[in-house]
Image: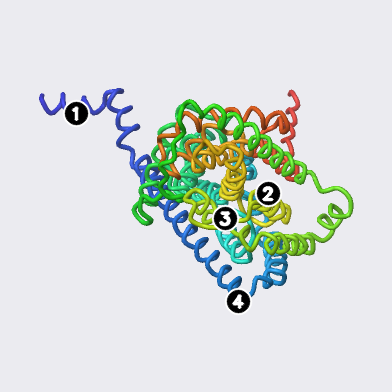
Amino acid sequence: MPFKRFNRTFQTPEFKRFRHRFLSPRLWLRGVVFWGGSIGVGLAAVLFALGAEKAEHYHRLLLELSPYLPLLITPLGLGAVTWLTQRFFAGAQGSGIPQTIAALERAQIRDRVLSLRIAFGKILLTLVGLSCGASVGREGPTVQIGAAIMHSLGRLVRFSRVQAANGLILAGGAAGVAAAFNTPLAGIVFAIEEMSRSSFQHRTNGTILTGVILAGITSIALLGNRPYFGHTGAALPLDQAWIAVLLCGGACGLLGGLFARMLIAMSRGLPGRPGELARAHPVAFAALCGFVLAIIGLVSGSTVYGTGYTEARHILEASGQLPAEYGILKFLATLVSYASGIPGGIFAPSLAVGAGFGLNLAEIMPYAPVGAVVLLAMVAYFAGVVQAPITAFVIVMEMTDNHEMVLPLMATAMIATGVSRLVCPRPLYRTLAERFLTFIPAPPAKEPAPEKAAH
């Protein structure tokens, strides 16, 4: 009798539901694959970061030979990267965040823009671009790479439900941000605020959180818990904070919105002869962009190349000499690099541009600490570009290991976002995602089956 009662317990509907939810071998297989994928995203981000540092190191070695070498190398490099992108890795161009958002909106294109082949091409071509001097970042590409890894693993174990598939892509993108910046909190905020403004579901909370934690642990384990901009103890007295907050938020938010609007305009096509050249001969146009970038590099004293991490850190720590016009020159270098159509993001260059503008603004506010003004300008310009204020101040706060400036950074980001929307009413990444979808025809609608004749 005891055995029969025990056996009946395993046949109850409650136990069957428990077994289906927690003891299913397929469920555990999916969990193991997802955890492994999150660690894989973190590992890919770490290797990408190390590769980017090496690529910039090799470019600096070329500059030591002659500052005029980019006049030859940069045009050839950007032209070659554009040719390889169009020939072998279509869908890898640009930041990667618009492609990821587009994949969330239209499931039919996911295999084309979130494949492991595209992820490999994104890494390879971004590194080549950095070694040639392009002013691009690796954070946006890491979002697409993380989403591609998780999507590919989801196909392996057949996550068939749309909600589950979306959760994997969101988790991969969030894990990519967390591992790329070494900022776990920013990864979660970015996924909610930017990537999934219209599609976030409560059931994806745990998926995103788990992915970010595992990717973040992998990054910290391999690279250490290091802020990319170092440690800064900059603080702003409350009696002076409102002046710097208003000025940095208004000026840098306006410039960030202008930059975003220019990128959106370029996505529709350049006017006149440059537009004709870009459409008819994209490789030649990319080479021309590389030559213009090299000219900007000569004017800047070779300071505008690469991600801008080193220059922004020098500005924050007052440990290096940069030209007074560094902010505007880095702005132009990033604009030209993006116009060329090569793979590469704008996160890190935008933070560097903001640091350059902060150095200019600090000169007209001698009563405020330079480091504090630079931090406010960084968050303001970045928030103006992406129009994601919470993501902006969380990234800057975590990357500088500074919690004394939370309230001023938050207020500046909100002001900058509001000002940015005056000149760029539509958010950058979502608008670029919509433009990306216009170049990909929607699948034809299925014709209704013919009705059978009545007998």
Q: Nearer the viewer, mark 1 or mark 2?
A: 2
Report x, y in % for residue 355. 57, 46
Residue sitting nearer the eye, 433 or 72: 72
Q: Is residue 299 above or below residue 423?
A: below
Q: Secondary structure at mark 1?
A: helix
* Mark carried by residue 201: none
**Among numbered discs 2 and 4, the one appearing first in the sequence:** 4
In the rendered view, tell whether residue 69 sits above or below residue 451: below
Point out the tag, 1 or 4, that comes first from the N-terminus: 1
Instruction: Give the residue type that dot 1 points to.
Output: Asn
Q: Tell me what residue is drawn at x 72 percent, y 69 percent.
A: 71
**Can residue 89 be seen in the rendering of this structure?**
yes
Q: CA distance from mark 1 to mark 2?
A: 75 Å
Residue density around tag 4, few if under 14, some if 14–19, many if 20 or more, within 10 Å: few
**Lower position in the chain sequence, tag 1 or tag 2:** 1
The residue drawn where x is 47% and y is 47% is 181
Q: Earlier in the sequence, mark 1 or mark 3?
A: 1
* The disc label shown at residue 65, or none: 4
Residue that numbered label 1 is attached to = 7
Instruction: In the rendered structure, find residue 307 and report the number of the disc placed on it.
Output: 3
Amino acid identity at mark 3: Thr
Q: CA distance from mark 1 to mark 3?
A: 64 Å
Query: Is there any visible trace of residue 168 in the rendered image?
Result: no
Q: CA distance from mark 1 to mark 4?
A: 80 Å
Residue 120 vertical placement versus 420 (above, below): below
SS at mark 4 in the image? helix
